[in-house]
Amino acid sequence: MASTKPGVRVAIYGCGSWANRTHIPNLLKLGGVEIVAICDANLPALQSTAERFNISRTYQDGHEMLDNEEIDALYSVVPAYARTDVEATAAAKGVHLFSEKPQALTMQVARKIDNAIRQSGVISTVCFRERYRPIFQEARKRLEDKQIVHVRFQSISGLPTPPPEDQQDSWWFHMDKSGGQALDWGVHATDYARFMTGLDVVRAQAFYCERPSYHNPLSSVFNYCFSNGATMNITFVSATPADVGDEPWFTIFYEGGHLAVYRYDRIDVNGETVYQAEEFDPWFEQDRVFIEAVRTGDSSDLLNDYHDGLFSLAPVLAGWESARRNGECVDVAAFMADETQ
């Protein structure tokens, strides 16, 4: 039987790996979704995506796509450095917005998009997908009555490898465009800490260890102060191929104990395993919830909107600025409001 649900017309802005591996396949699994057009400045990526998914309407300019297509929702999947005003223009036209993270490289761009969304009243969300994963929701429940003292996140990997010859010009290997791991996964670490604890970051400080023979930092550390006075430390280390053992991603210390989240696998409380995760696809779940929100006009099941996402983006951008200032502590609220940022 054909679906009786109203159709949702979607356009994809950005035809990179995340669009091809997750969002487009997910949308095609959902009933009543039509991908009417795709856009990417990279012609080979645009053509290969169009051929793979049999999408006939293609553009290399986002504004041209918005001018020529009737769409209900825009999936913005371009890298942060490429964000300008396409999302803001879409929101002003009444188009609902799904934004991949990081949302922008500057608060100026992010504020412009946010203002357009809030003025138009369209539905929006940022792809902090792990909020939908049951393990993080379980951690949030177990922490809701706790007085948080400190949050620790750590990611340890091998030395950065040189870019392949055919990718030497890729944006990912240029710190001024990619921001390295601290931007790519730092916004995730910040957001999931916010989600689990219910706290916002009020001050940020960061340091990077950069060496001229490597394209990305060998380490970076972000220090946060939360709204209740608690602290957080985010550490990325790219130095050792050796296995560091059974180390948690997140350890949340509270008055009287601690909770540890081991990747997507389990939760320990005071050293005892209290939750073992089952397989789950947060990408699909967030895409499903967003499309249903657009279809019904009810966004209550979405676990964030674009405005909330700014409070996970801003601490990382503030930390990046702190590192440029030799570790100067940055007031996050002032940074978010600063017209020069």
Image (tube, grey):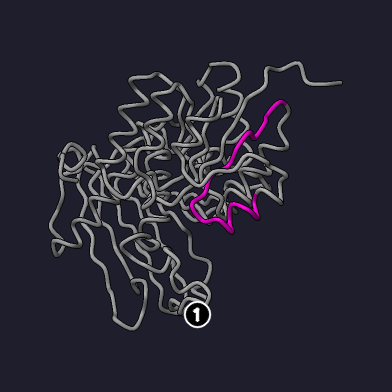
Bounds of the magenta span? Answer: 32-49
Residue 161 vs residue 140, the one in the foreground: 161
On the image, the x and y values in percent for residue 161 come to 47, 78
Q: Residue at x 36, y 79 (%)?
A: 214
| Position of residue 85 measured from the top left corner of the image (x, y, whole percent) | 35, 38
Above or below residue 331? Residue 234 is below
Q: Position of residue 185 (x, y in %)?
A: 42, 55
Of the pair 25 and 319, the residue shown nearer to us: 25
Indicate left or right for 116 with 79 as reference.
Answer: left
Secondary element at image label 1: loop
* In the rendered image, the vertical position of residue 239 relative to residue 94, given as above or below: below
Left or right of 269, for residue 296: right
- Would residue 27 appear left or right of 158 to someone viewing this image? right
User: Is residue 272 or residue 66 the one in the foreground?
Assistant: 66
Is 36 magenta? The answer is yes
Residue 249 percent location from the top left of the image: 46, 58
The N terminus lies in which quarter of the figure?
top right
Residue at image mark 1: 241
The image quadrant that residue 288 belongs to is: top right
Q: What amino acid is found at the position of numbered circle 1 in the picture?
A: Pro
